[in-house]
Image: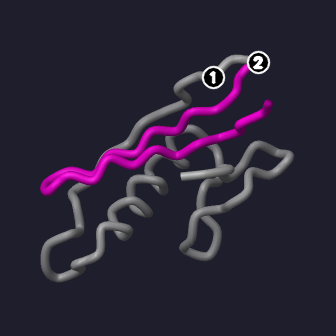
């Protein structure tokens, strides 16, 4: 069974971390991690803003496109951009 790329988000009160796990050579591998300040407090009151910011940082670090038009790119493309689940 092919799971594909998974973006894991850890949303804390101060820091939000995202981790990208994907199948590499038939095995699940950690591709990269990024973190930013959480956005659960004012002025945003929405944890997803920090997830998007951390995903943008992760995309820059890994060279994979994870966002399109300000949203997560789901499902993963044949070029290995995006993720299959988060």
Label 1 and label 2: CA atoms lie apart by 7 Å
- In the rendered structure, which segment of residues is drawn in magenta? 1-25
| Residue 23 belongs to magenta span | yes
| SS state under label 2 | loop
Tell me which corner region of the image, top left, top right, bottom left or bottom right, holds residue 39: bottom left
Q: Which is more toward the observer, 49 or 1?
A: 1
The single residue placed furthest to the bottom in the displayed view is: 43
User: In the drawing, what numbered circle is on residue 26?
Assistant: 2
Residue tagged 1:
28
- How crowded pointer 1 is (Cα within 10 Å; few <14, some 14-19, many 20+) is rated as some
Disc 2 packing (10 Å; few <14; some 14–19; many ≥20)? few
Our reading of the magenta stretch's main secondary structure is strand
- Taking the spot 13% from the left edge, 79% from the top edge, the residue there is 42
Q: Position of residue 55 (x, y in %)?
A: 47, 54
In the displayed structure, 57 sits above or below 62; it is below
Residue nearest the viewer, comparing 49 with 9: 9
In the rendered structure, does residue 18 fall within the stretch colored magenta? yes
Name the side, left or right, on which 57 lies relative to 46. Answer: right
Side (left or right) of 13 relative to 54: left
Q: Position of residue 27 (x, y in %)?
A: 69, 17
61 lies above or below 30: below
For numbered disc 1, what is the local secondary structure?
strand
Residue at 46% x, 44% y: name it.
Answer: 8
């Amino acid at each position: 069974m092919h799971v594909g790329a998974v973006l894991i988000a850890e949303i804390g009160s101060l820091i939000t971390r995202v981790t990208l796990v994907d199948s590499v050579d038939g095995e699940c591998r950690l591709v990269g991690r990024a973190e930013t300040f959480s956005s659960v407090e004012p002025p945003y009151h929405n944890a997803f803003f920090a997830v998007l910011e951390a995903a943008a940082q992760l995309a820059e670090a890994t060279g994979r496109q994870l966002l399109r038009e300000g949203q997560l790119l789901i499902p993963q493309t044949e070029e290995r951009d995006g993720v299959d689940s988060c």
